Amino acid sequence: MSTPPETAYSAPAIYSLPSANGSDLPATASSAGPENPPWGVLSALITWFLSIAAVALVPVLCVQPYVAYRFKNGPAPTQEILLADKTFVFLFVLGWVPAHLLTLVLIWAVATRLGKYSLKGVLGFSWRPDFRLGRSVGIAISLFVMAWLIAVFSGPKKTDLDQILDSSRAAALTLAFIAVATAPLIEEMIYRGLLYSALQRAIGRWFAIIVVASMFAGLHVYQYRQNIGAILSISLLSFVLTYIRARTGRLLPCFVIHLVFNGVQSLIIVLEPYLRDIAEHWRPQPTTGLLFHLLGFLG
C-alpha cells in the first residue's frame, strides 16, 4: 500500500518566523496539515478550556448518585470525609474516563472540521525518517531517569495524586490505566496538536514552544504544589515534548514519548505491592516515600 511522501508534514526550521501572509488563515483541503491547521488560535483555546472543564465537572457528576445515596440520612459531607471515602475516590477517578472520551470527540470535531479532514493528517500522526519509535522510547526512558534524579535530590513529598494512590488499590489501578489509555493521547492532541499548531502559525515556533510548554506545566502546578521536584519534572517533560513537536513537525513522537513515560510509572503502580514486599525483605524499615513521589508525575 502506498503512503504519502514523508515531506508532506515536514516542519520548517525551528528558528523560522511566522509567514507574512497572516497567522490564522484557514487552510485549504490540499494544504491542511500540522503546520497549516484548519483551525485557529481561538478554536484551540476554546477546546483547551472545555477539556479542562470536562475533567473538572464530569467526575463530579459521576459521584453525585453515590454521594446522594451514601449520605442521604445525614448532614452534607465535608471534603475531608469525602476524600477519606475509598468508594468516592475510586468513582471520582473513574469519572476521568468519560471526561477524556468527551474531549476526544471535541478534538475530532475541531481538528477535522466534522470529518472534512483526516485527523491523522492534520495532527501529524506519522514518523519522520530520522525520528522513529526507537528514538522516542529512548528519550522517554531518559526523561524518566532524569525525573527520578530530581526526585532523589528534591526529597519525597506527597502530592494530591499520592493521596489517590494511598486511598485504595482499585483507585491506584484505575489511575494507572488512565495514565496509559487516555491521558497521553488527549493531552498531546490538545497541547502539541491543537494549541501548538495554531500558535506556531500565529506567533512563531519559539514563542509557541514557550507558551504551550508553560500552559501544560502550569496546569499541573496546583496538583503538584506540595512538591517542587514534581513541578520541575513535569516542566522538563513539557518543554521536551513541545520542542520535539516543533523540531519534527509530527505529533506521533510526542505521543509515544508521553505514553512510555507514563507507562513506566503505571507499571510501578501495578507492581508496587510486590516492590514493597521486596524492600521490606531486604530492609526492615524501608523508606517508600520516594516511590510514591515518583508515582506523582502522571501528566
Image (tube, grey):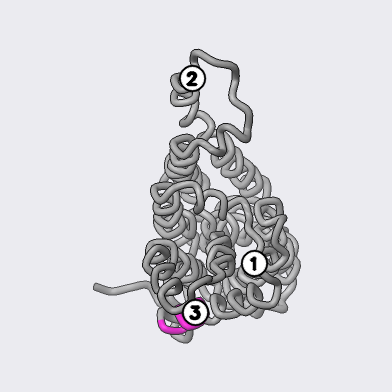
Q: Earlier in the sequence, mark 2 or mark 1?
A: 2
**Is disc 3 placed on a helix, strand or loop?**
helix
State the quadrant of the N terminus.
bottom left
Q: Is residue 131 left or right of residue 154?
A: left
Give whichever of 30, 155 is nearer the camera.
Answer: 155
Kindly identify the residue that appears in the image at 68 percent across and 70 percent down: 155
Q: Which residue is mark 1?
A: 156
Q: Is 250 above or below relative to 269?
A: below
Give whichever of 207, 275 is nearer the camera.
Answer: 275
From this viewpoint, is residue 185 visible? Answer: yes
Q: Which residue is mark 2?
A: 68
Q: Does 138 lie within the magenta span?
A: yes
> Of all residues shown, which one is farthest toward the front?
284
Q: Earlier in the sequence, mark 1 or mark 3?
A: 3
Magenta span dominant secondary structure: helix
Distance between mark 2 and mark 1 Cα atoms: 37 Å
Distance between mark 1 and mark 3 Cα atoms: 21 Å
Circle 1 crowding by C-alpha within 10 Å: few under 14, some 14–19, many from 20? some
> Of all residues shown, which one is farthest toward the bottom?
130
* Nearer the camera: disc 1 or disc 3: 1
Magenta highlight range: 134-141
Q: Which mark is residue 141?
A: 3
